[in-house]
Image: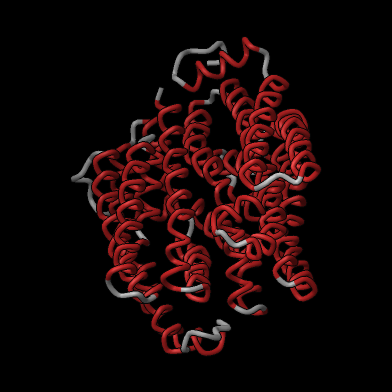
């Protein structure tokens, strides 16, 4: 029952976070303007880039706590969590100081602002550092709750605080101080509250609240954490390199269009992030238990369900972005600029999402080196590809680069996982468990788009047709991937009931 509950809670959190961002965006554009929203987009990129300072410790904590629960070493896990809490506070202070130091240079020389003064941009960047510092420990305590299979608690906290933060921010901008500085101050306050609440919940979930600090214990996890640090650095550069390049080579307005497209595509995280957070500790526990049969069955069955839902959502974005943005922002011109960007970003993100399964299996099997080598190879290829495409096509080039590199990732990453980790996770897994759902959802989505274009329907009707096409694709994907008896078996596993494989 816990697997299904955690997945449902995590998915609900992802839905709420995405909806908050989508609902709040028109208010931010109205009160702050497009260039200020470009600064918010830059903050999102900066936040992701600075995750390299996590050094792979958050996923390490998840794996350690999941393993500790299986082998009866909860006290050691609790000691590790307390010790890393001190490390994270130190890193938070470092982040605030580092960003404050480079803020004037970023405001004057990096960001291409036209309407906003350089001083305002520099102050906003400085407050970004404060915001990042306040939020920094969140990943540690969220990771601890993931490893303890208490994802529902983290999700409930995230939903509550994010809703309150959005309402408060909009209220301050509407009736208080209408500035980008006020935006970041409010966000920082709620980020600090989020970190404090998660700390309390994580320590309760892990138990052994009197466990000692032990910095020597860091040596035990350093090998895994060091490779995870490399994975984090290369992975984050891979995911943000297009945005970093575009923030330099194009002005803030088209960059804001790119970030709008990225925000839309982030809706795919409704599925990807909850799946990783739910299945990674489960994979770790099954490997620690030596239950290969259940691991294989869970890996393959979960892929089929995940791929069906992911590709249905992704193809909906590919073919229906323009009517969606037109209704969302009420601006057909902006929608026409955002639509092609969102289409290619959605394709790349869907391919990347499928690879969460091989990635999770690599980490659960204790082979982060393989994940690092794969990411490093992709980064070496991506740098010249994105630079060339961005120079030639601007924002569209960044989106094309993202789609191209993830297509390569699917081919290479799947082959390496099947060869080096588990034989069942190779290309046959990709073709059967991801390829069939992709084809099943693509055809109805394409047909729906053709109907909309042929009949020249309005945006509301287009979204309705797109929604029906997605549901049809899901139905075809499930029917083509599972026999009725097998589907019932998968549901039984999700709700914690015994299955033959268990």
Residue 132, by quadrant, is: bottom left
x and y, in percent, of residue 159 in the image: 36, 46
The residue lying at 58 percent from left, 25 percent from top is 298
Foreground pick, 191 / 358: 191
Foreground pick, 115 / 156: 115
Q: Is residue 219 visible?
A: yes
Residue 304, by quadrant, is: top right
Foreground pick, 328 / 445: 328
The image shows residue 312, relative to residue 128, as above or below, that is: above
> Can you say which quadrant of the picture contains the N terminus?
top left
x and y, in percent, of residue 229 in the image: 52, 59
The image shows residue 338, relative to residue 420, as above or below, that is: below
x and y, in percent, of residue 379 in the image: 69, 63
The residue lying at 46 percent from left, 44 percent from top is 14
Foreground pick, 462 / 496: 462
Q: Would you say 431 lies left or right of 240 here?
A: right
| Colouring mode (rainbow / by chain / secondary structure / one colour) | secondary structure
Q: Is residue 222 visible?
A: no
The residue lying at 46 percent from left, 89 percent from top is 117
Looking at the rendered structure, the number of numbered marks drawn on it comes to 0
Q: Would you say 152 lies left or right of 399 here?
A: left
The residue lying at 58 percent from left, 56 percent from top is 231
The image shows residue 22, relative to residue 474, as above or below, that is: below
Q: Would you say 139 lies left or right of 326 here?
A: left
x and y, in percent, of residue 381 in the image: 76, 63
């Amino acid at each position: 029952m816990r697997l299904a509950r955690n997945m449902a809670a995590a998915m609900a959190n992802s839905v709420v976070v995405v909806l908050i961002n989508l609902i709040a965006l028109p208010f931010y554009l109205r009160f702050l303007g497009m260039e200020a929203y470009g600064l918010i987009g830059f903050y999102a990129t900066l936040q992701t880039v600075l995750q390299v300072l996590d050094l792979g410790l958050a996923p390490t904590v998840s794996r350690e706590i999941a393993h500790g629960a299986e082998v009866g070493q909860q006290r050691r896990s609790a000691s590790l969590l307390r010790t890393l809490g001190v490390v994270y506070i130190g890193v938070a202070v470092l982040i605030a100081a580092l960003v404050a130091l480079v803020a004037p240079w970023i405001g004057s020389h990096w960001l291409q602002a036209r309407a906003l003064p350089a001083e305002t941009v520099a102050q906003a960047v400085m407050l970004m550092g404060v915001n990042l510092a306040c939020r920094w420990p969140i990943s540690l305590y969220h990771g601890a709750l993931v490893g303890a299979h208490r994802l529902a608690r983290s999700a409930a906290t995230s939903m509550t605080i994010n809703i309150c933060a959005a309402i408060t921010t909009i209220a301050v901008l509407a009736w208080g101080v209408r500035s980008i500085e006020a935006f970041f101050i409010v966000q920082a306050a709620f980020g600090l509250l989020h970190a404090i609440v998660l700390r309390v919940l994580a320590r309760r979930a892990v138990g052994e609240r009197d466990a000692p600090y032990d910095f020597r214990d860091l040596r035990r996890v350093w090998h895994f954490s060091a490779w995870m640090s490399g994975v984090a650095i290369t992975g984050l550069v891979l995911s943000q390199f297009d945005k970093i390049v575009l923030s330099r080579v194009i002005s803030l307005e088209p960059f804001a269009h790119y970030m709008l497209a990225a925000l839309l595509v982030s809706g795919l995280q409704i599925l990807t992030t909850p799946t990783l957070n739910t299945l990674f500790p489960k994979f770790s526990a099954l490997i620690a238990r030596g239950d290969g049969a259940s691991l294989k069955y869970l890996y393959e069955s979960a892929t089929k369900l995940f791929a069906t839902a992911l590709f249905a959502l992704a193809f909906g974005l590919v073919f229906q972005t323009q009517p969606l943005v037109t209704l969302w922002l009420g601006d057909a011109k902006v929608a026409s600029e955002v639509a092609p960007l969102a289409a290619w970003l959605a394709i790349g993100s869907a391919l990347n999402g499928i690879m969460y399964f091989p990635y999770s299996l690599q980490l659960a099997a204790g082979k982060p080196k393989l994940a690092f080598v794969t990411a490093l190879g992709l980064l070496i290829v991506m740098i010249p590809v994105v630079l060339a495409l961005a120079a030639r096509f601007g924002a569209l080039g960044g989106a094309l680069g993202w789609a191209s590199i993830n297509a390569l990732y699917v081919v290479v990453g799947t082959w390496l996982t099947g060869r080096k980790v588990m034989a069942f996770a190779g290309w046959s897994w990709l073709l059967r468990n991801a390829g069939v759902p992709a084809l099943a959802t693509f055809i109805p989505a394409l047909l729906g788009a053709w109907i909309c274009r042929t009949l020249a329907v309005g945006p509301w009707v287009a979204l309705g047709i797109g929604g029906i096409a997605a549901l049809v694709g899901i139905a075809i994907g499930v029917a083509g991937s599972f026999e009725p008896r097998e589907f019932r078996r998968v549901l039984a596993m999700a709700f914690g009931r015994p299955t033959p494989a268990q």
